[in-house]
Amino acid sequence: MNVFDYFFSSTQNLEKDFVLGSKETISFKQLHENSLKIASYLKANIGENKKVVLISPNSVFFITAYLGILKSGNVCVPLNYVVEQDNLDFILETTACQTVFITKGLKQRVKFNEDITLIDETESSQLISEQEIVSFSSDFDSNNVAEIIFTSGSTGKPKGVMISHKNISANTDSIIEYLKLTEKDIIGVVLPFFYCYGLSLLHTHLKVGGSVVLNNNFMFLGTVINDLKNYKCTGFAGVPSHYQILLKKSQTFKETKFPDLRYVTQAGGKLHAVIIKQFIDAFPNKEFFVMYGQTEATARLSFLPPEVIKTKTSSIGKGIPGVNLKIVNSQGEEVAFNEPGELLASGDNIMLGYYKDKEESAKTIKDGWLYTGDIAKMDEDGFIYLTARKKEIIKVGGKRVSPKEIEEVILSLPEVVDCTIIGIEDELLGEALQATIVLTGNADEDQMRENIIQKCGKNLATYKVPQKIIFEKSIRMNATGKKVI
């Protein structure tokens, strides 16, 4: 089944609005029809199995184009709307893309070859008004590539994660099940749809008949708070920096009542236990789901049930429905409880491989198992804890140091909004530790430098105390909300 038909299997005639907001709305019925017209246009004009790039902030334009590309039997390539020209050129050339959906505002920022067809909001609306819906075969292979999501590669060039129609439907079913999503759910969306976590919000709420509230201005915290209240959002999803900013930069957020909010989810990196505790203390009646995933797994691999958030705070939980997780040593053998090893995953959500990169695909997927590159351990109750990514381990004087352990200690200081530990070159130690700190507005940097060193000295081994501390005024984030290190 084409994942488009999976999404709309019970909602294609709903008059209810799928997109809510002050700027634009659209019903399920209208979205279904408009997307079919986009699909019909693409089928008639470019055929099938072509790569179609999509560059747009979250909007009805993005959603309609995205769904139309999927239905047409072509492959959607959603890109960061602040994509660098070099990366764009590389992706366009690698995928042999000839058709790009792009917003008017972004057309002026990047350059395209003359032979590439650009479709903006106006042209999209025009073809929707003129296009007749064509027939589509029901005989569709769900293992076909639906989308290619490009992520940072080890060589400096982006690598394309190939996600199938089956991958998307499998992961969507799993997420719906453990979050208990229904047609009554409304999600506040600050995560961009070119990011797999953001796309999962679109997929799940489209499938269950829920709604999405799009907010592309997270740094204006008042708009986020107002959206959650005014549109009666039942859910909110964020990466660690979102929660750090909401809890440490906005007193209003902690003091606001959100009577309709049932749950929040967090993924996209480790959120330190001290921040989770702050949220739970401020909102004891809201369900907090810690989640873990990778683009290579469509979106999600594990979740921590809210009922154990206080006793298993640092855990990423257990595998989501339909996903198996295990931890192995360098020989590929499963390790004992509380013994570290690499985390592996299997399930129908695991990617097909990396686009045009058989060697890297073979390294990452072996015998049906995804090698995540994350070091983890499992306790006697079956809960999994990430200890580090392989590449994140810092060696200080030959001793292995996990940055997360140090960040956790420093973040426990109330004046610290954010902390990032990295390894820097050091002639004596090989690598030394540098802490980059963001403080609340009224904190004194000189005093805080002393406080941080004292706090680390009391709670960590001497070699884990940062040798260098620098301060920045704000958290540097990319378009997904993740920290830029």
Image (spheres, rainbow, N blue to C red):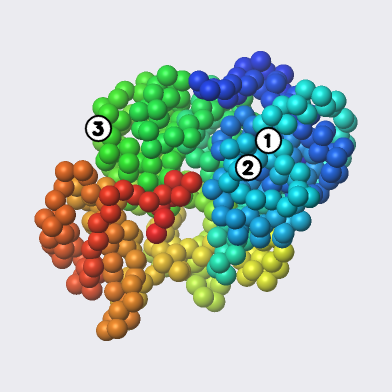
Determine the image quadrant of residue 451.
Answer: bottom left
Q: Nearer the viewer, residue 54 or 281?
A: 54
Residue at the spot of label 1:
120
Marks 2 and 3 sit apart, C-alpha to C-alpha, by: 39 Å
Q: Secondary structure at mark 2?
A: helix
If the image is split into quadrants, where does the C terminus sit?
bottom left
Q: Is residue 349 visible?
A: no
Q: Residue at x 67, y 31 (%)?
A: 121
Q: Give whichever of discs 2 and 3 has the lower sequence position.
A: 2
Q: Position of residue 423 (x, y in %)?
A: 34, 70
Q: Nearer the viewer, residue 312 or 192?
A: 192
Q: Position of residue 153 (x, y in %)?
A: 57, 64
Q: Give whichever of discs 2 and 1 has the lower sequence position.
A: 2
Q: Position of residue 293 (x, y in %)?
A: 52, 51
Marks 1 and 3 sit apart, C-alpha to C-alpha, by: 40 Å
Q: Which residue ends up furthest to the top in the rendered image?
A: 15
Are circles 2 and 1 on residues that touch, CB within 8 Å?
yes
Residue at the spot of label 2:
107
Q: Residue at x 23, y 73 (%)?
A: 463
Q: Give whichever of discs 1 and 3 has the lower sequence position.
A: 1
Q: Position of residue 9 (x, y in %)?
A: 72, 28
Residue at the spot of label 3:
251
Mark 1 surroundings: few (<14), some (14-19) or many (≥20) residues within 10 A: many
Q: Secondary structure at mark 1?
A: loop
Three-letter code, disc 3:
Gln
Three-letter code, disc 1:
Asp
Q: Secondary structure at mark 3?
A: helix
Q: Is residue 57 visible?
A: yes
Marks 2 and 1 sit apart, C-alpha to C-alpha, by: 8 Å
